[in-house]
Image (cartoon, helix red, strand yellow):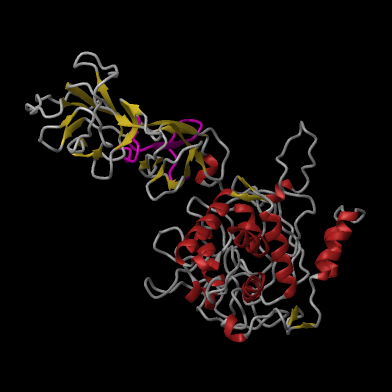
Amino acid sequence: MAAQFGRRLRKGVTTTAVAAAAVAALAASQAPGVTTDGQGRETTSDTTPSPEETADGAGATGNSPYYTDLPPLNSPNPAPSASTGTDLSGVAEAGIPATVLDAYKKAEAALRESKPGCNLPWQLLAAIGKVESGQARGGRVDADGTTLSPILGPQLDGNGFALIRDTDDGAYDGNSSYDQAVGPMQFIPSTWEWAGRDGNGDGREDPNNIYDAALAAGHYLCRFDWDLSDQRDLDKAILSYNNSTDYLNTVMSWLEYYRKGTHEIPDGSGTLPTDRSDNVTVRPSSPATPSAPASPKPSTKPTKPSGSGPSKPPVDSGSPSTPPGTTPPTPTDTVDHLEDAGTATLTAMAGDAFTERISARAETKAGKAVAKVRIRFTVVGDTDTTFTGGESVATVVTNSSGVAVAPALLAGERTGPVVVQATVVGRTVKGVAYKATVTERAADTLVRTGTGALTCTAGGEFADAVELKATYDGEAADKVAATATIVKSILDPTANDKGPYFKDADGKAVRTLSGLTTDADGLLTLPQLYADDTTGTFLLRVTTAGGATTTVALTVTAAGATASPSPTVSPTA
């Protein structure tokens, strides 16, 4: 481990006091009683999980080599800004390719639902993904999240590595003699057989797909009901992935680094690691063509017949169809901009689903539609409007016409404008901003539920409460705001200064009440009504948002007098 730190620090920080402090801190994390396992890795008796906890001694990766590059010593928080003079060293390394980052966050959300007690942070998946594959080789993945070429570890033939003979007939790793770790999270085939998950909903469990691999890694880390917010359980989970204290320390260093902040970068632009735990230095041939970890060429043994097992990953034939040092463009690489694909006016009442859906089309510079591109729709701003399901972000792949249709929007309770931004995942190009409007809940009909006369003697109180029902399009209108006023006349809606009244919180007479709201059944029951010494017939007008109005007659008689039937007053809209 000291040699690895030395290589890192000689890259430009050996003279700083901060570097010395970092080395001291990480060196101190090596617990007493360090021993060496059969592969020359350091382990400790107090942190190594027991056999029953690890399920198999090889862990998720077969204890395959991993990248030992460490994060920069400076904070990842500063945003890049040439004008402010901010030290930007290390900021690029804090970035995570867009599709890869999306996969980690989706896996965290899935585990939050299925295993909430595990408390899996997506930053842990990012840390493991960094040391296992350099975030899928800097994010070289297609629109579905599958790596553009297989990521394979060295064959585990016992020659400097563990000995794990073939368990999958080469179905996952293309090697029918020995197993190799596969994909961005580097699962060995025997582990993937039971740990594999379908993270992108395509019906397959593919270790070469970052969505599948990230979800599988999350379930693997949470499989023993560990609470990853507890450092002891966190250590056990990481060591169960690769049983090495050096591995634990490297993953923890990236975990803490990502917890301080990170940001999304375009797919394929991630910083590539170079130093590996087996002392192999991996050098990319160019920034656009990161090379895989050094490994023997996979076997070209034919795949199993359909339905007999996992599909076999594509294997490098040794005869590339493109010149060395170049990579064929992905559909995402060809996108120049997004266009609105005919989205209609977006308006909905609070609490209702928008009837129209947002659609965007991915196009080349020449205006040609681009299929199989991931479009991210994000509800931005201070609003509680979401997509159905409660999410503020939705990612959709464009169809053969280059169009992606977002899930339906569900209006929240906050009224006013809402903005939804459409962007291309993994590429910085012109997007589309959609404007939506949330209006207040409304009623188009308001009627009194009772039919009896509302009477009272002067100076007394009305025996019957006034109850009304609000509807909209024939359905009960809930949570609709209403105002009740004792008006001067049918033609004069201003508040009367005499006659029946309500009481405010201080017991004072008021003849206008605002802030009233219908209940879940659209019912509105007014507070107790009282009468002063003025006799006669008075009008109570109730108005709701949306304009529904009804007027109710209130009769006040002298003490001892017999009340005549109240006049019938029709509701008005």
Q: Position of residue 421 (x, y in %)?
A: 48, 36
Stretch of the chain drawn in magenta: 346-374
Which SS does the magenta portion mostly show? loop
**Vertical comparison of 345 with 90: above or below:** above
**Vertical comparison of 228 with 468: above or below:** below
Furthest residue to the top?
491
Number of disc labels: 0
Residue in the image at 87% along x and 52% along y: 12
Furthest residue to the right?
15
Q: Position of residue 261 (x, y in %)?
A: 67, 50
Nearest the eye: 507 or 128:
507
Q: Position of residue 67 (x, y in %)?
A: 71, 64
**Does the magenta segment cover residue 571?**
no
Nearest the eye: 494 or 151:
494
Residue in the image at 44% along x and 41% along y: 384
**Vertical comparison of 261 with 229: above or below:** above
Nearest the eye: 442 or 468:
468
Please state if 248 lies on the left or on the right of 472 as rendered. Answer: right
Please state if 367 lies on the left or on the right of 60 as rendered. Answer: left
Residue in the image at 34% along x and 29% along y: 514
